[in-house]
Image: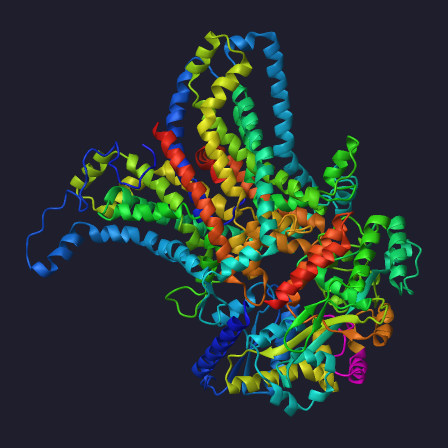
Amino acid sequence: MTLSTKHQAPTEGDPVPRPASGPMVPAPPARRPRTRNLRTWVRGGGLSTLVFLAPMLIVFTVFSWSPIVQSVIMSLQETNLLDAPTWVGLDNFVHVLNDPLLGTAILNTLYFALLALLFGFPLPIVVAVLMSEVRRAKGFYSALAYLPVVVPPVVAVLLWKVFYDASPTGLFNTILGWVGIPPQPWLQSSATAMPSLVLEATWAAAGGSIIIYLAALLSVPPELYDAAEVDGASIWNKIWHVTLPQLRGILFIMLILQVIATAQVFLEPFLFTGGGPNNATVTILLLIYRYAFQNSLGGDYGEATALSVMLAIVLALLSWLYFKLTERWSTS
Amino acid sequence: MKSPRTVAIAGLAAFAMVGALAACSAGGGDDSGKTELRVATFPPGADAAAYDAFAEQEAQFEKANPDIDIIGVEYEWEGPTFAVQLAGGSLPDVFTVPFTDSKTLLENGQLMDVTDEVEELGYADKFNPIILDAVKDGDRIYGFPRQAYAMGLHYNRTLFEQAGLDPDSPPTTWDEIRKAAKTISEKTGKAGFMEMTQNNTGGWQLVAASAARGGSIQEDNGDGTYTSTIANDATKAALEFLHDLRWEDNSLGSNFLLDWGTINQEFAAGNIGMYSSGSDVYTALVRDFSLNPDDYGLTVVPVENGGGTLGGGDIAVVSPTVDDATKAAAVTWIDWFYMQKLLDEDAAVLDAKTLTESGQAIGTPLLPVLDRETYEESLTWIEPYINVPRDQMTPFTDGIWEQTPVGEPKGKTQEIYALLDTVVQAVLTDQNADIDALLEAADVDAQALLDE
Amino acid sequence: MTTTQPPVFEGVDAPHAASGLRGVIGRRRAARRPDETGDRGIVSDHDRKNRGVKVGMGGVHFVLFVGLVIAGLGPLLWLAKSAVTPTQDTLRQPLALWPNGIDWANLPQAWNDVHIDQFFWNTIVIAAGSWFFQLLVATTAGYALSVLRPRYAPILNGAILATLFIPAVVLLVPLYLTIVNPPLLGDVSLLNNYLAVWLPAAANAFNILLVKRFFDALPREVFEAAKTDGAGPFRLFWSIVLPMSKPILGVVSVFAIIAAWKDFLWPMLVLPDPAVQPLSVRLPAVQQSIELDVFLAALAISTLIPVVLFLVFQGVFLRSAGLGGAVKG
């Protein structure tokens, strides 16, 4: 079974299809017909079910379902909190699409995603494959690899900001100095700012991926390796023809998840560079934040939600793709 | 604001709303017959001593005005707070806003007309007309200018000495600044000069540097429209100055992502020879950034080609939603708390005395919101309480009167500052940045903003 | 990776995590089989006898060790060192060991003067509240949908699942306005109120699905038996289902606490008053008003608790990471 539960299929562990009222309740005696339905419902556990559902219903209605609906409405309105919102049709979308920064933000976000794929995607796979072959101290290695993930992200960014000190006595520049490389500007140049952000983000996130790949590697059936060896496969052959194909599913899932995550990158550009230098690190989410929250005179909530909605549609498509894939792979 | 029509609709709606709210709260005041007045105090997180001083002043005021009950409210002009507070009903009845934002608020109908009250108090004509202009729409007045600053050049006297420069005769031209910066960075290894670039401060400083060279980034057409003139020679010269310091002299240090707070921090930590910021920043440098007062020096920003010194400041305003009784109380408070210490000896002495007792800075150089004579006279009243090293600021306090004050641009100020941040960052982080092209592009973008 | 607002985005990973839960439990069992014959990986025992492979493995071992120590431990060790190093030393010789001695005073200064103690406490309160509300909502809803199963359950399941496809970002502004002006509460704003962080965090579809999946797999016979003994739905929930669900409650707790500890953007928006802000929001703000050495000490203190928690509960952490790890951490 996977999580495919749009249709409430009976689970394996659940032999009897269960009526809503629960089988243990005796049929209520028919009394006054008007209240009968309500009584049946209450005595059948309908009320207690609702009591159990209440916390979820309340928080989801107020903090999830209605904001989702509101965001669509707000993207078509001009809202400044003070006056009644006015309908403006697609004006917000037109404005956002005409904002010269939007192109920059999209390109920057794609650039971040691309760099994150280049740095951040293969590295954990390699490390995980190597770690899976280590026989001693596996737990120790897992812990080491996971340690950066435990550091609060804000602390990580602020710490790396110190590392990225662009003066010759900055930490990274000192290290570069040892091997004769001149000091780098890191965050202080349009060219190196984004790679610097990605480097930190990769450091902060790789541990999580490593642990997932390690778990996935355990599930590769050993028989496959045995079979490959019978065919005289070398270690490389085994990695290439057995391990990686077996990991195909999880690799693709991780890829989509990473794209979804990087499309919403905010913390790094916000804290490292504020989008600078020269807009080199303005990302889509940073732009949304600026629309809504930068201006003390009241944010442009309409434009912010319009851009959010556009981003959300793209991401929802990706999520849907991901969902379909997990469903297929886990059922097969 | 999208289009004139939307503006009009929004404006109408705002007035309708304001009317409705006023109707709701009409006849306010509580059972005791006292009028409750909620006034802005300090940003969240201000130190306890500042609150002690405020409590003392609150008591003084309530003693003099027994029918008014003052309630201090934390307040900060930052982030999305204003609209949120106004909508959420937590906006104080009296608060302050920077000159640069007053115009937008005026357009939105979010400020209370106080013309009659100002005239009744009798000092309407004492205001510095350039400053009063910030709160006027036609001949109506919408607030009390209460404090103003001019841009100043702040320098580290200790670094000057270490570099063999005379801290008592700081640079007086941009060329001298460049030379001094180079000397400081060569002799001490610190940044000779530093420039803010982030959170709209880059644009703010560029506009100031442009004004000092006789430039202006927009023209007010007088009919509510503006023409962007960013791509002018003065702005270009200002950027070339930064470019030369950065790429030829390498005297700007290595951090080009600074804003108002971080540059203060760097300066207080002794890492900066000179930087340009508001003349009143000393208060914050000592209070929030632990500057050693002995290091501090302040002079005027050099002015060339008929330029002037950019100034700014803030105004005390009344929330548009209050009823008449509260409005009257609000004006009484503004007059007592913000204005009388500028006009009246007893009030000035009392204020200075109260503030020094709590260790707040007194005597930080400002630009007078009233005329110069009144300002200088007020300084003699509070002489015994002055606790800032004014002798280290004489190059500024002597020189500022020679300079023409210039107001900040009025159209889409913050948005255009944000655009210019990018230009300044580009020049500082890209050796081959094409200044002309950057300015042209910014000019087009700014005009698009102004035409909205 | 980097999102800050918890509910929905994490939710995106739910399908994976949920299948992963089964997967990991299954895999662990599966993985035990080869254990009997020794660890069977890519490199066979036969390979390992090969001299070249032996040397190669040794090299891999070494590179892995050095790499992981530098990347995983290095920055933290540096932070620990710098927390007690005078500012000028850190600036001039960032990699030297205490050229001018150790400055222990940084730590108490950060704790007392910068009020790290206060922000630390706020962080704990936020994490505890988020944890409580997330568990409350996830277990009650999971129980209702999995065990009680009202007729309309499929609709709710669909509505919950649907939120997984909506990324957090789309909620940012409307959710913020909801907090500024909550429905049915009149003029009261939830700004600076911890409920503004706790409740949206509890609207987490991922948790509910995770818990529901787990409940689905519990043996129905036990429930039937309990009902025959006269246990009502509340007894069943409290005395039977919850005690059987400790593993999944542990996982949800780890997720909830980690997410709360890491969250930045959302608390920054809804908790503008510094007195109630958590460390993540406060640290960037205090950075500019304190000296570097004290600031690094503050960073070190803020890192200590999560790291210690991790070292103590390593197993739970790594297992949870294996599940939903993509939930990014």
> Whole-percent x and y of residue A108?
61, 46
| Frontmost residue, C289 versus B412 | B412
Q: Quadrant of the C terminus of chain B?
A: bottom right
Residue drawn at point x = 53 percent, y = 30 percent: A210
Tell me where the magenta segment starts and ends, as one range: B359-383
Horizontal relation, residue B434 to residue A261: left or right: right
Residue C279 can be seen in this image: no
Q: Does residue B447 belong to the magenta stretch?
A: no
Residue drawn at point x = 30 percent, y = 54 percent: A54
Where residue B223 sits, quadrant-wise, is bottom right
Q: Does residue B372 belong to the magenta stretch?
A: yes
| Frontmost residue, B66 versus B258 | B258
> Whole-percent x and y of residue B391?
86, 70
Residue C109 can be seen in this image: yes
Give the vertical position of B263 relative to A213 (above or below): below
> Whole-percent x and y of residue A278?
69, 51
Where residue B3 sits, quadrant-wise, is bottom right
Q: How is the image coloured?
A: rainbow
Horizontal relation, residue C155 to residue B49: left or right: left
> Whole-percent x and y of residue A231?
47, 8
Residue drawn at point x = 50 percent, y = 57 percent: A93
* Number of numbered discs overlaid on the protein picture: 0
Give the vertical position of C308 relative to B433 (above or below): above
Q: Quadrant of the N terminus of chain B?
A: bottom right
